[in-house]
Amino acid sequence: MARRKYVVGNWKMNGLSAAVADAQAIFAAAADHGGVDVAICPPFTLIGALVAAAPGAAVGGQDCHSAASGAFTGSVAAPMLADAGATLVIVGHSERREGCGESDADVRAKAEAALAARLAVILCVGEPHEVRESGGAIDYVLAQIAGSVPDDFAADRLAIAYEPIWAIGTGLVPTVADVAAMHGAIRGALAVRFGGAAQDMRILYGGSVNGDNAAELLDAGDVDGALVGGASLTAAKFVPIVAAAAAL
Ligand code: PGA
């Protein structure tokens, strides 16, 4: 099965009601690029509005709790995301691993909860700058994969996003060779654990992807798409990334 390119916008803590129009413009333009899967993960507060404004479009959460319900003030459960019309969720973003102290075990539990709620999962991994500098990036990321990827899922329901922490929101990106080496190592580790199914799992790159660098990053070996933060907030910035994916 050929892996379709997958371009996902992570709006983070950005977007009020007026941003629904941006999402509509993105999904409308994305429809012209039929070979690419496009999703937007807005803040929780906008999920329902995006689903209503763009029926059939892929809208996701940016996090979920590992429990299906309960006394967890401020948290959102995976079944709630599905009930709001979301079809996917990001788990393990470095801003949650670092900012909220989420461990690999926490991330795995969230991914399992999401899969149980029939959400597709984008599971993030990535090394801090000092680990990249010390030459330990691949070992670090493969340990995150070992600890946070669940055992049981359909290959098309869980994608990995490799996001070097030092590349997120900084304008810095790894070399294409480094991206290809990391993605190849991730695919190799997935193949050891999951066999042939690893060939059907998508591995996205994230970290300062924009319309100028998307084509070469998306063309790197074992790169099946992009997880995009800052450049996903408007159609003017995001659609060129979708177009770059479609052109490959
Ligand atoms: P960025 O964020 O594109 O703004 O670097 C990517 C991400 O954190 O998912």
Image (spheres, helix red, strand yellow):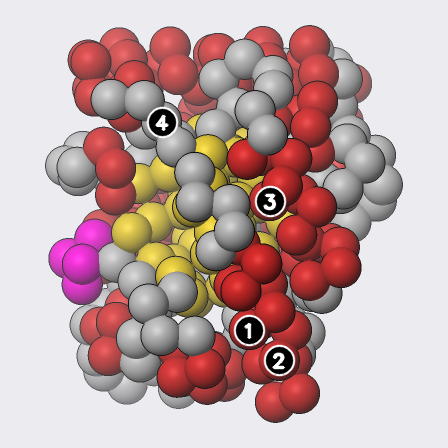
The residue at 59%/63% (across/down) is 26
Question: How far is disc 4 from disc 1 in space, using C-alphas?
Answer: 26 Å
Pinpoint residue 89: horizontal percent, then vertical percent.
38, 58
Secondary element at tag 3: helix
According to the picture, the residue beneath numbered tag 2 turns out to be 21
In the image, what residue type sits under mark 1? Gln
- Residue 98 appears left or right of 130: left
Say which label, 3 or 4, has the lower sequence index: 4
Q: Quadrant of the C terminus?
A: top right
Question: How far is disc 3 from disc 1 in space, using C-alphas?
Answer: 15 Å
The residue at 37%/38% (across/down) is 159
In the image, what residue type sits under mark 4? Arg
Whether the magenta-drawn stretch holds residue 116 is answered as yes
Label 2 crowd bin: few (<14), some (14–19), many (20+), radius 10 Å:
some
According to the picture, the residue beneath numbered tag 1 turns out to be 24
Q: Quadrant of the N terminus?
A: top left
Tag 3 near tag 2, CB within 8 Å: no
- Residue 52 appears left or right of 180: left
Secondary element at tag 4: loop
The residue at 66%/87% (across/down) is 18
According to the picture, the residue beneath numbered tag 4 turns out to be 3
